[in-house]
Amino acid sequence: MKYRLTFVAGAAVGYVLGTKAGRERYEQLRRSAQQLTRNPAVRNTAESAAQQSREFADKAYQAVSHRVGDRMPDSVAQRVRTLRERTAHGPAEDDWGTSNT
């Protein structure tokens, strides 16, 4: 989600600078983006997508861990454990109002 936000912000800045639209157009884009992020439907959809991706990632992890087993490097196994512990403590809010996990 962070990468999408960065992309959208970069596109908006590029548009403003590239077209010489000026401050007024920039403010209009900013207001539109804020309205979009505050929209309950957008927030619910983003949270639903985030939850589905977490579930899919967990299923993929289970499938891979059964096949890979002890062949996984210790550094990768430690990183996976760290990520799982972080998500176990509850999701953090990101700029879109969704879980940042």
Image (cartoon, rainbow, N blue to C red):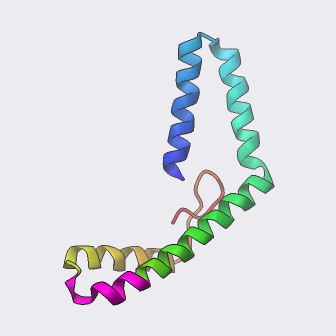
Figure quadrant of residue 67: bottom left
Residue at coordinates 71% horizontally, 47% vertically from top-left? 37
19 or 67, nearer to the observer: 67
Give x and y (percent) for residue 90. Answer: 56, 75
23 or 44, nearer to the observer: 44
Position of 21 with respect to 62 (left or right) is right
Residue at coordinates 28% horizontally, 79% vertically from top-left? 77
Span colored in magenta: 62-71
Give x and y (percent) for residue 98. Answer: 63, 61
Give x and y (percent) for residue 51. Answer: 61, 70
Q: Is residue 39 above or below residue 71?
A: above
Residue at coordinates 35% horizontally, 89% vertically from top-left? 66
Total residue callouts: 0
Q: Is residue 58 above or below residue 12?
A: below
Residue at coordinates 28% horizontally, 78% vertically from top-left? 78
Figure quadrant of residue 69: bottom left
Q: Is residue 82 above or below residue 6?
A: below
Position of 93 with respect to 45 (left or right) is left
Residue 63 included in the magenta stretch of the image: yes
Figure quadrant of residue 72: bottom left
Residue 68 included in the magenta stretch of the image: yes
